Image (cartoon, grey):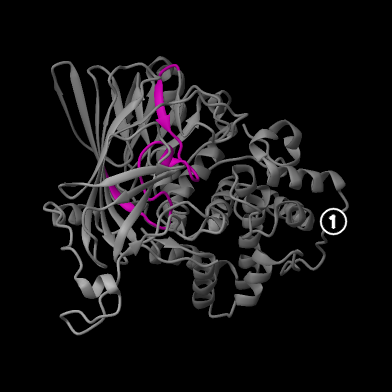
Amino acid sequence: MFLRDPLLGVVQGVHRTGGAGLLAAAMLSACVVTEPPGDGARLGGEASSLGGPVEKPRPGAPGIGDPLFPTLGNGGYEVLHYELELRYETAAPTQPIDGTARIFAQATQALSQLDLDFAGDSVGDVRIGDAAAGFVRDGEELVIAPPQAIARGELFMITVAHFVATPKVPSAQRFLGAPFFSTLDGSGWAGQPSNAHRIFPSNDHPSDKATFSFRIDVPEGTTAVASGVATGVETAAGRSVYSFEQRTPMATELAQVAVGAYTVVPRASSNSGVIVRDVIPTRLLATLEPKLAIVTDQLNWLEDRVGGYPFPTYGTFVVEASLGFALESQTLSLYQSSYFAGAPSTYDTLMVHELAHQWFGDSVAPAQWADVWLNEGHATWYELTYRGGPDAAQFVNTMHSLYARGDQYRAQFGPVATPPSGSPFALFNSNVYGGGCLTLFALRQQIGDAAFQQVERAWVSRFRGLSASTADFIALASEVSQQDLTAFLTEWLYGSVTPAMPGHPEWTVNSVALASEAADAAAISADPMENTAALGESLLLRR
């Protein structure tokens, strides 16, 4: 995600691979649910026929264990693949989705009950395999009672039929308040960080990545695009069905579906063969198409620095709307059209920021949301590097300015890897972006440029397609640099005081004596989405 700090001017988690979705779909084509447990399982203490204790089925947890989002995600299973069938009855931008989700999963415990995250309008029915399942809605949870208990390790399929979600008009004053949004031209998705389940039923946490299939049924003449690779379009009886496959694991919050009066513009492939396409409102095509062409060169630039792009396709999706942010939807980054009103120098670094996220945040997702500095710190690093390397005077001066405000940021927003809460302004705060980038600068100062570049490449290579934590980054940096960086990086990421900057003993930190900032911090914790005007440039400048 791209937010703007005025100064920039411009916990450990579980690894979850997301599974092999297409293989999972084949394995689960029959989707057999386990037989009912025997008496030993119901009693929880008798031996099974294999000689070991039979696990007693119990409900899966209604949250995945993220301290910032206690009820986000769900315990007891991991999703392997989502198959989403989405019908848009009319071409109206305000048209709700009538959808069916088939969710292929594997149980990590014996389940008597399981949850999905869902906060859309309604649900038709739920099935496990071919059998009807009981369900109730409890707040933003869809609580499902399987017809038979599911054993640990069992592969199973959940079908949620005729779920409905309705788009809203987005507003920068309600930051991230319209995950399914409408514009003059159509609709799109913006599920970060915790809002994908407001659109479709899911295990809505980035630690449970999965592959995706999309089939999007729209009136003939309407364009539909989704994350991943286009695999075909069928048109008959006045309707068109577009198909897309996201064959590399994706966090739910990064899924994108664009439907409306859009034109898909093919671009020249990158040097490595990445397919590039942009999605532009047809009426804005002449204005926007030439400006977006720089993305192929930016792909080549980042591949030279980080390594191979992790997906087969990339592109930009531009909407005329007041979003207040740009978003790194996987393989199709989202922007509002006003960002491109000026010369390339006003938007090129923004595009690099979102492109960098395809490696840092998309391919390698955060294990917990407190690890989001790994996304935003890296994207900010490459955004700034695009205008000149980390030894350039402008870059060093920016780091110097960030360093001077280090204690202020820590007092106002918490340490770099400890956002104060999961509310959007608190999670995506200035210290996550600027402080995260400054931490990377300090790391480079400590281990040298050659080792730093090796760390960057090793990070996106080793954890490609996975979810990884701050602890993982510290361990990998220590391994690659052959230095124990545990204390060094722990101080930078979790300390309440800004550490000394290696190589710059002359740098000093400003004192923290700003009562107004303490008030801002309190406002963040209270209800940040209602305090945009009050926070103003002291927090984030969104453009």
150 vs 215: above or below? below
Q: From this viewpoint, is residue 245 visible?
A: no
Question: What percent of the width, then of the height, locates residue 186?
Answer: 39, 21
**Residue at horizontal 54 percent and vertical 33 percent from the top:** 177
**Residue at horizontal 50 percent and vertical 23 percent from the top:** 169
**Residue at horizontal 25 percent and vertical 53 percent from the top:** 146
127 vs 90: above or below? below
**Residue at horizontal 48 percent and vertical 68 percent from the top:** 454
**Mark 1 is on which residue type?**
Asn
Q: Please state if 300 lies on the left or on the right of 82 as rendered.
A: right
Whether residue 394 appears in magenta in the rendering, the answer is no
Q: Please state if 531 lies on the left or on the right of 210 as rendered.
A: right
Whether residue 196 appears in magenta in the rendering, the answer is yes
Residue extending farthest to the bottom is 51
Region in magenta: 184-213
Figure quadrant of residue 377? bottom right
Figure quadrant of residue 150? bottom left
Residue tagged by mark 1?
510
The overriding secondary structure of the stretch rendered in magenta is loop
Question: What percent of the width, then of the height, locates residue 191?
Answer: 45, 40
Question: What percent of the width, then of the height, locates residue 290?
Answer: 43, 25
34 vs 176: above or below? below
Figure quadrant of residue 114? bottom left
Q: Quadrant where the C terminus lies?
A: top right
